[in-house]
Amino acid sequence: MTIMIHSNYGYEPPEWVAADARLDRWYRDKKRRAKQHGAFSLEKKRRKQHAKDKKMPLS
């Protein structure tokens, strides 16, 4: 019988714990990269409209 290790997901064999750690690291990296590039954002980033682009009223 293999030694069971207590992890975040319960008691698992060492191979499963290592696989879970790799998957968790991969998922954190994907989330970090998506956050950096603004992916999966519900709100679109809006650029400021410059004064030269606005129509100025004649006074």
Image (cartoon, rainbow, N blue to C red):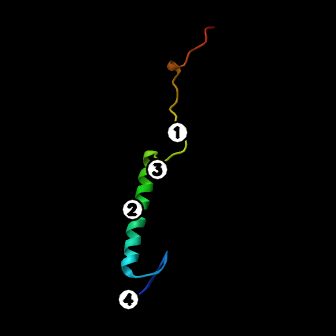
Q: Residue 13, percent across and down?
A: 40, 82
Closer to the eye: label 4 or 3: 4
Furthest-bottom residue in view? 1
Q: Are marks 2 and 4 in contact (CB under 8 Å)?
A: no
Q: Which residue type does callout 4 highlight?
A: Thr
Kindly state the secondary structure of the residue where label 3 is placed: helix
Write the residue at 56% across / 15% down. 55
Write the residue at 36% across / 78% down. 15
Residue 57's label in the rendered image is none
Kindly state the secondary structure of the residue where label 1 is placed: loop
Q: Quadrant of residue 42?
A: top right
Name which of mark 1 and mark 4 comes first in the sequence.
4
The residue identified by callout 3 is 35
Q: Is residue 22 above or below residue 46?
A: below
Q: Which residue type does callout 3 highlight?
A: Lys
Q: Is residue 38 above or below residue 17?
A: above
Q: Residues within 10 Å of mark 2 (few under 14, many from 20)?
A: few
Which quadrant, please, contains the C terminus? top right
Name which of mark 4 and mark 3 comes first in the sequence.
4
CA gap between label 1 and label 4 equals 51 Å
Between 50 and 14, the residue placed more toward the observer is 14
Q: Which residue type does callout 1 highlight?
A: Lys
Residue 44's label in the rendered image is 1
The residue identified by callout 4 is 2
Q: Residue 4, percent across and down?
A: 43, 86
Q: Residue 1, percent across and down?
A: 38, 91
The residue identified by callout 2 is 26
Write the residue at 54% across / 19% down. 54
